[in-house]
Image (cartoon, helix red, strand yellow):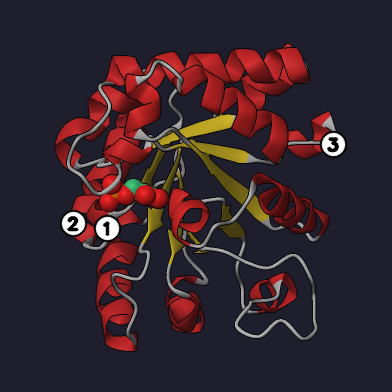
Amino acid sequence: MRKPIIGGNWKMNRGTPNETIEMLESLVPQVEGIDTVDIVIATPFTALTKAYEIIKDTNIKLGAQNMYFEDKGAFTGEISPQFLKEIGVEYVILGHSERRDIFKESDTLINKKLKKALSISLKPIVCIGEHLEEREAGKTMHKIEYQINETFKDLSKEEMRKIIIAYEPIWAIGTGKTATPEQAEEIHIFIRNLLSQKFDKETADSIRIQYGGSIKPINAEDLFNKKNIDGGLVGGASLQSDSLFQIILAADKSIK
Ligand code: 13P
């Protein structure tokens, strides 16, 4: 039995101190007592400390949207994973398609970051997914397999079991065009089968695979009802507490 996990990825859309206080002070009482779903909020770096003050004694966990793979040094503009840990960050999103496409992060770099996160017990949420042209050319599975092979290179089963995968078809991110539950489930099954071949069935069955891409309160339940979809990584709908709360409730309902 895999516990669903809902991640709110605020991207660079919200994160002033006032916005952070407003959103989280409203979310905390809404989700109080929900222990069937893991809840993670990934704010911009500048809002992490403020967010932690509000959620530290609650069931909401703190996530970062990125990190570097070194602890310290001359890396202007980068963020040390150790700094994140010290301010209460538990999860880190790695390899988001926006990092890959806009900031040219390679699978090799993401693999290094992933190993670093695992080595200091930050819980990685690793994003994979295909572009629209790849889907239309029938190359979705090929892309996913490539990303899995490269991003998860040289990991042990024990390490792999600590990772959360987010399948985010890039054509569905921020477009309002959600993958249908059937389209998403097909890829989630494909991912799980690949993990089973690469590691073993027990490992594959234990790994949580989130869906991400235009999740809204209206479509969340149908997605989460699919057997291999273990919650979601939510962008736009995570900016308001009411919509994120509805999505968390959908995840809670999917296991009952
Ligand atoms: P949207 O929910 O805004 O489509 O964003 C999804 C996403 O990229 C989450 O990481």
Q: Where is residue 73 drawn, in percent x and y? A: 80, 84
Indicate the quadrant containing the C terminus: top left, top right, bottom left or bottom right.
Answer: top left
Which picture quadrant has residue 212? top left
Q: Is residue 189 left or right of residue 206?
A: left
Q: Earlier in the sequence, mark 2 or mark 3?
A: 3
Mark pair 2, 1: CA separation = 8 Å
Mark pair 3, 1: CA separation = 41 Å
- Does the residue at mark 3 contact the one at mark 1 (Cβ under 8 Å)? no
Q: Amino acid at mark 3?
A: Asp
Badge 1 density bin: few <14, some 14–19, many ≥20, Cα 10 Å: some
| Circle 2 residue | 242
Q: Is residue 245 left or right of residue 170?
A: left
Q: Amino acid at mark 1?
A: Gln
The answer to whether residue 256 shows anywhere in this view is: no
Q: Which mark lies nearer to you, 2 or 3? A: 3
| Circle 3 residue | 154
Of the pair 104 and 124, the residue shown nearer to us: 104
- Does the residue at mark 2 contact the one at mark 1 (Cβ under 8 Å)? yes
Badge 2 density bin: few <14, some 14–19, many ≥20, Cα 10 Å: some
| Circle 1 residue | 30
